Image (cartoon, rainbow, N blue to C red):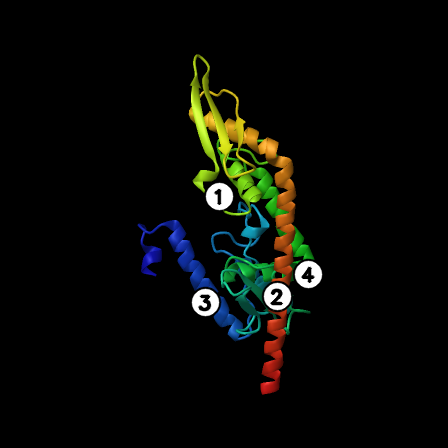
Amino acid sequence: YEKCMDLNVAQSTVGNLVEQLLKTRNFLLGMYGVAPDPKWTGSITSPAGAAGAVAPASPEEIKWSAKIHECLAKKAARSMTKGEITFNTTAADETNKTFVSTLSAPTVLTAEYSSEGPCVSKNAAQHSAAMVAMKAEFAEVYAQLVAACASASRGQKRKGSPDAAPAGPPEGKSALSHSVQMLLGRPVTKEDMVYVTVQVEGAGNQSTVSLPTYDGGKSYQGPVAPSKKEAEMAAAKLACAQLRNVVVVLEEEHKAKKAKKNAEAIVKMKKMHEDRKAAAATAS
């Protein structure tokens, strides 16, 4: 209360405090079977349907776990009770660096839903599973959220480039680094790309990028540019363009391998989940 009334505390901090209070209140209401006001089941600073609320720029930014809770509460006309919605999240492999998750809610969902593939964190895996559930159980709401993301993305303009055209094939030094990684099949080191820039009298700078560890040491000389940085970027752009046909094939192969690995991880995760359910049923 003291922080909320302290005029030196930032408005965003006050909003977060009030939001936490409302969430606790809604939880307590749910314990007594009272549905919270749907207008305030989202953010206190951006209530549902509020004008000016900023939509996420991509579906990945949507908090799908929160959305599935909201939709299920609305469907059941009550708050979800503790344990009614569960996520079974496990490591996708022995490295424990990626995770998969299965969302279960037998009383309100028609099926269990698994994440689309291994994710970099447990939280991301749960959001992925919730997104799959939203798409299957609440297709209309899902479509509206994705459409809002598309509209927000179209409305955003890249900093420093108000009228930027749609992105074409990757180019530049970072893109060349990605291309070389695809070509070598391993992370790139500084020895894999060497830039040599010389001054052209009365014209500017000209850079040549060499790839000593690829195909006997390929080199690509870019056009003359005003500065050393621009000359290196021009050489990298030229190299990317000439390597593009080979890199595209390698990227497709990489995507196929990744998709296969993701599918295998999901099958493994589902089997683990089924084995645990079977073991629990046997134990009881």
Residues under labels 1 and 2: Cα distance?
A: 47 Å
Q: Position of residue 8 (x, y in %)?
A: 30, 50
Report crowding for label 1: few under 14, some 14 to 19, many 20 or more residues within 10 A (C-alpha).
some
Residues under labels 3 and 2: Cα distance?
A: 18 Å
Q: Nearer the viewer, mark 1 or mark 2?
A: 1
Q: Nearer the viewer, mark 4 or mark 2?
A: 4
Report crowding for label 4: few under 14, some 14 to 19, many 20 or more residues within 10 A (C-alpha).
some
Q: Earlier in the sequence, mark 3 or mark 4?
A: 3
Q: Quadrant of residue 136?
A: bottom right
- Which numbered circle lies on residue 24? 3
- Which numbered circle lies on residue 188? 1
The answer to whether marks 1 and 2 mark residues whose Cβ atoms lie closer than 8 Å is: no
Q: Nearer the viewer, mark 1 or mark 4?
A: 1
Q: Decide which of 24, 216 is in the foreground and name it.
A: 216
Q: Earlier in the sequence, mark 4 or mark 2?
A: 2
Report how many numbered discs are placed on residues in the image: 4
